Amino acid sequence: MSRLTVGDTAPPLALPGTDGAAVGPDPADRAATVVVFTANGCPYARAWHDRIQDVVRDYATRDVTVLQVVSNDETDHPEDSAEGLRQRVAAGEVAGPFLRDADQVAARAYGATATPEVFVIDRRGVVRYHGAPDGDHDDPAQRAGWLREALDDVLAARAVTRPVTSPAGCSIKWRVELRWWAGCPTRERAAQVLRDTLAELGRGEVAVVEREVRTREEAERLGFPGSPTFAVGGQDLFPTAAPSALTCRVYTRPDGRGSPLPDTAELATALRAALVRPWELPGWTDFRTQSARPSRTTTG
């Protein structure tokens, strides 16, 4: 799974706000765009929440837009449903667009792992900062200082002093979609293998959604190459050049044999990469051990 980093071009966003209308501003229209992956129940996201709202207000007149995106699967987190978002907006708790990434496509496209996780994007659409809002979730006096520093640098057209910090907070609550077609007999076995593999990885909390693909049009829209297909955030865990079709899928095992199901070790590897948590990232720095004074850590 590729993860967006500083210097990369950010993928476009088009997500529904709490009124159902799609929001997807063009970075070229603003001096800077901030994308914050957040959550309504995560204690770290809640701790940083007011600081993020202050950034929204303080930079509103400086040609900056802040998009707050909730991508968590709502199966065990109903507070992160569309209704949960509407309730917070109605209560006046959120400044700026509050967007629901129900299919987790945006989180996967950005390679986000945490709530909160911040991306600052310049007018050219290039990521200039990625990481945490500041160095201590438990110190409101830090005022999302790392984010503010990055914005000030971008607005002044200078290099960002601290471009990367470790994403810090709760892990994004993912789900895996098992896409199947009724013409193949592998659905039940595929679902069992998927659940067993998640359990072996210690990821039994990850929701599994079984989705029947019924028509050729749906197969084309989903990029469905056959049954069964395993997807996270709309992306096939086993990308293939095979055309979309209502057919039985053939996986190639490590020994070269064809099989109706992927090798379990390869499935585990693909799931581990797609569902990685922030503290499992290379070079991750445990923000909980940092002092209230921001460090100069630049690994993420």
Image (spheres, helix red, strand yellow):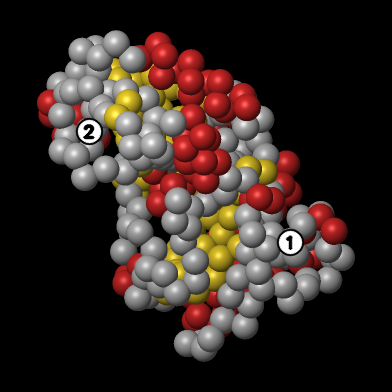
Q: Which mark sits nearer the N-terminus, 1 or 2? A: 2
Q: Which three-letter amino acid code belongs to the residue tagged 2?
A: Pro
Residue 54 visible (yes or no): no
Query: Could you tell me which residue is drawn at 44 percent across and 47 percent down?
Result: 108
Task: Describe the element under mark 2 as helix, strand or loop.
Answer: loop
Instruction: Name the residue beneath numbered marker 1.
Output: 285
Which is more toward the observer, 217 or 256?
A: 256
Instruction: Name which quarter of the figure residue 133 lies in.
Output: bottom right
Q: How crowded is mark 2: few (under 14 residues within 10 Å), some or many (20 or more)?
A: many
Image quadrant holding the C terminus, namely bottom right
Which is more toward the observer, 68 or 227?
A: 227
Q: In this view, does 51 lie to the left or right of 189?
A: right
Task: Describe the element under mark 1 as helix, strand or loop.
Answer: loop
Q: Which residue lies furthest to the front in this view?
A: 255
Q: In this view, does 241 lie to the left or right of 18?
A: left
On screen, 288 above or below 185?
below
Instruction: Name the residue beneath numbered marker 2.
Output: 225
Disc ID at residue 3: none
Q: Is residue 85 left or right of residue 10?
A: right
